[in-house]
Image (tube, grey):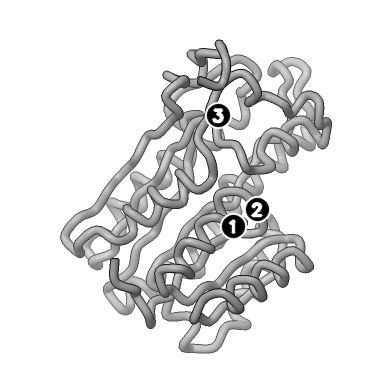
Amino acid sequence: MKNTFQKTAFITGATSGIGKATATLFAKRGYNLIVTGRRSERLLSIKQKIKKKYAVRVKALAFDIRDKDACKNAYMSLDREWKKINILINNAGLASGFDPIHRGQLDDWEQMIDTNVKGLLFITRLVSPGMVKRKSGHIINVCSTAGHEVYPRGNVYCATKHAVDAITKSMRVDLYQYGIRVGQISPGHVEETEFALVRFHGDKNKSKIYEDFVPLNSKDVAETIFFMATRPKHVNIQDILMMGTQQAGSNHIDRSGRN
């Protein structure tokens, strides 16, 4: 595949997992990058590694996506050329806690809502006007199988991803008349990420949830995002629902071993 120099991809949550794998793949294919995340040291390390390996420009913006003022300040720090964003990948998201609704922790709920829903909206509100003005651009939201179904103890996390599904559909209706493509990717279980560790508040034993089946990995999802982003101009992929072969849904997993 030909490199795509002179194009810029803005990727949130790029310090680990799907975001990091996506940033690496887009850089390999010649895209300049704007990568964001809360952990400045890790973000800087990723920036340096990508710049050393690939002939692209990389801008790292360290801030908390839950803070609308921090989002605005980070975006406004970009010069005019950097603001010509071709692809926005709203990847930042998390699950926090795994309690039934009657024992849920309010701090967990607020963290998920503020990150998965409000953070996505804050960044989209900043980036999309430029796309509208140029009548060109592509927004890809990272949703989840949890945005299409629910599972025990998933309650608020599932609600946030259902919101992402609805927001994506609404974005599509609002923006198609400006030549902007909008879609989402909805993966099931994905290893090589910090998802489970964050969900279980850093408990490494509880986070070992992939030992008896083979889920997707972060590279699988990154490659699919890249496929979505590189279709011909007249093609818009609305949603890709993807899972490992041993997973047939959030409530249906073959845990007979890593076959």
Mark 1 element type: helix
Mark 3 near mark 1, Cβ–Cβ under 8 Å? no
Taking the image as shown, residue 147 lies to the left or right of residue 230, namely right
Q: Name the residue under label 3.
A: 158
Mark 2–mark 1 distance (CA, rounded to whole Å) = 5 Å
Mark 3 element type: helix
Q: Which of marks 3 and 2 is in front?
A: 2
Mark 3–mark 2 distance (CA, rounded to whole Å) = 22 Å
- Which of the labelled discs sits on residue 20, or is there none? 1
Q: Where is residue 106 in the image (x, y as percent from the top left)?
A: 77, 32
> In terms of image quadrants, where is residue 13?
bottom right
Residue at image location 72% in from the left, 69% down from the top: 45
Mark 2 near mark 1, Cβ–Cβ under 8 Å? yes
Q: Where is residue 241 in the image (x, y as percent from the top left)?
A: 37, 34
Amino acid beneath label 2: Ser
Counting residues from the start of the chain, the first of labels 3 and 2 encountered is 2
Amino acid beneath label 1: Lys
Q: Position of residue 127 (x, y in %)?
A: 47, 69
Q: Where is residue 54 in the image (x, y as percent from the top left)?
A: 52, 76
Q: Name the residue under label 2.
A: 16
